[in-house]
Amino acid sequence: MQSEVFDAFRSIGVEEGKALRAAAAPNERENDVRDLKSDVAILRSDVTILKSDVAALKSNVTTNTADIATLKSDNIIMKWMMGFVLAFQVAIFVKMFIH
């Protein structure tokens, strides 16, 4: 097909160099389109990988949220325990000096 386009340009009086470049242009565009299709395929695979990574991150966030809730409840219990221990120590200290 490239030679047909070249012959058509030459038959209407286009210079040889210009006719050759014009005839080669569709092939260059086809190569560009092929390269773009390849890039799109690579991007699609990257997006698929990213989707799986995001799903894994969501799972980790859910697990971490549950762990944080457990730690908060344990922290509350520890605060109450420390309060009782301090209260008893103060009571023992006061008892030592008052008696």
Image: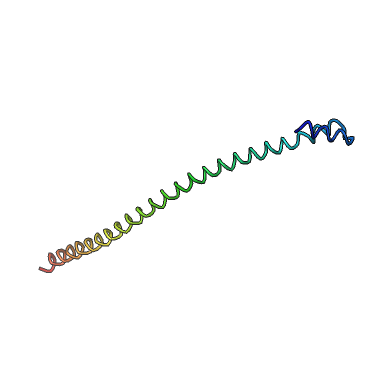
* Furthest residue toward left: 99
* Above or below 19: residue 63: below
Residue lying at 55% horizontally and 40% vertically, measured from the top left: 42
- Image quarter of the N terminus: top right
Left or right for 5, reference 67: right
Residue lying at 20% horizontally and 64% vertically, measured from the top left: 84
**Percent from the top left, x then y, of residue 62?**
37, 55
User: In this figure, what is the number of numbered marks?
Assistant: 0
Residue lying at 33% horizontally and 56% vertically, measured from the top left: 66
Left or right for 44, reference 80: right
**Percent from the top left, x then y, of residue 72?**
30, 59
Left or right for 51, reference 39: left
- Image quarter of the C terminus: bottom left
* Closer to the camera in the image, 80 or 85: 80
* Above or below 97: residue 43: above
Image quadrant in which you'd find residue 5: top right
**Percent from the top left, x then y, of residue 15?**
87, 32
Colouring of the image:
rainbow
Left or right for 90, reference 11: left
* Furthest residue toward right: 13
* Furthest residue toward bottom: 98
* Above or below 15: residue 57: below
**Percent from the top left, x then y, of residue 40?**
59, 43
Residue lying at 83% horizontally and 35% vertically, measured from the top left: 8
* Closer to the camera in the image, 49 or 87: 49
* Closer to the camera in the image, 37 or 8: 8
Image quadrant in which you'd find residue 38: top right
